Image (spheres, grey):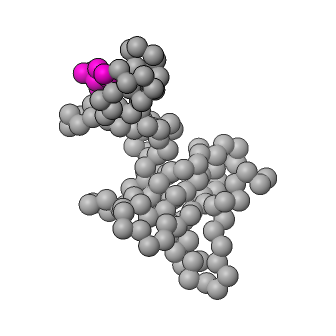
Amino acid sequence: MEITEVRIKLVEKTTERLMAFCSITIDGAFVIRDLKLIGGPHGFFVAMPSRKLCIHCRKCSSKNPLKAGFCNACGNKIQSQNLPRDEDGRVRLYADIAHPINTDCRELIQNRVMAEYEAELIRAQEPGYASRYEEFGDE
């Protein structure tokens, strides 16, 4: 597998840990969008694209946030006993849409994204800078 392109969108003046969004192209044929570059307590890491998990109302089958106490559609009390949890026992609120299945692949993505992030920081200092991130889909 070869990462043939990385596009970065810097997040300006954030008080959060989110530093940038990025998209990667694999083998010039497959794009994964909305990866996030996060500044964590032990350095930067790449978070894969994810979706919010939901729970369905037993009465009307409507989707509701995992932490909801009552259904947004019908008002029925939500039974949230068997919520998905991570290895530390915390409720998992998001699930990855795409993710590497081994350490080598994760490191390949992480290293390439970090290198492009550093280059994007330098490009952002140049006059007339414009992020190429939004250009996806124009091909």
Main structural element of the magenta stretch: helix, strand or loop? loop
The quadrant in which residue 129 appears is: bottom right
Residue toward you, 80 or 96: 80
Magenta extent:
77-83
Residue 115 seen in the current view: no
Q: Measured along the vertical axis of the image, is residue 57 above or below residue 130?
A: above
Q: Residue at x 40, y 13 (%)?
A: 59
Q: Measured along the vertical axis of the image, is residue 51 above or below residue 10?
A: above
Residue 76, horizontal then vertical, whole percent = 35, 20
Asked whether 81 falls inside the magenta stretch, the response is: yes
Q: Residue at x 56, y 64 (%)?
A: 9
Asked whether 135 falls inside the magenta stretch, the response is: no
In this picture, residue 128 sits left or right of residue 41: right
Of the 4 image quadrants, the one containing the N terminus is top right
Residue 29, horizontal then vertical, whole percent = 70, 44
Q: Measured along the vertical axis of the image, is residue 93 above or below residue 21?
A: above
Residue toward you, 75 or 138: 75
In this picture, residue 92 sits left or right of residue 32: left
Q: Residue at x 31, y 34 (%)?
A: 67
Residue toward you, 26 or 137: 137
Residue 61, horizontal then vertical, whole percent = 46, 17
Q: Residue at x 32, y 23 (%)?
A: 78
Residue 89, horizontal then vertical, whole percent = 20, 34
Residue toward you, 132 or 111: 132
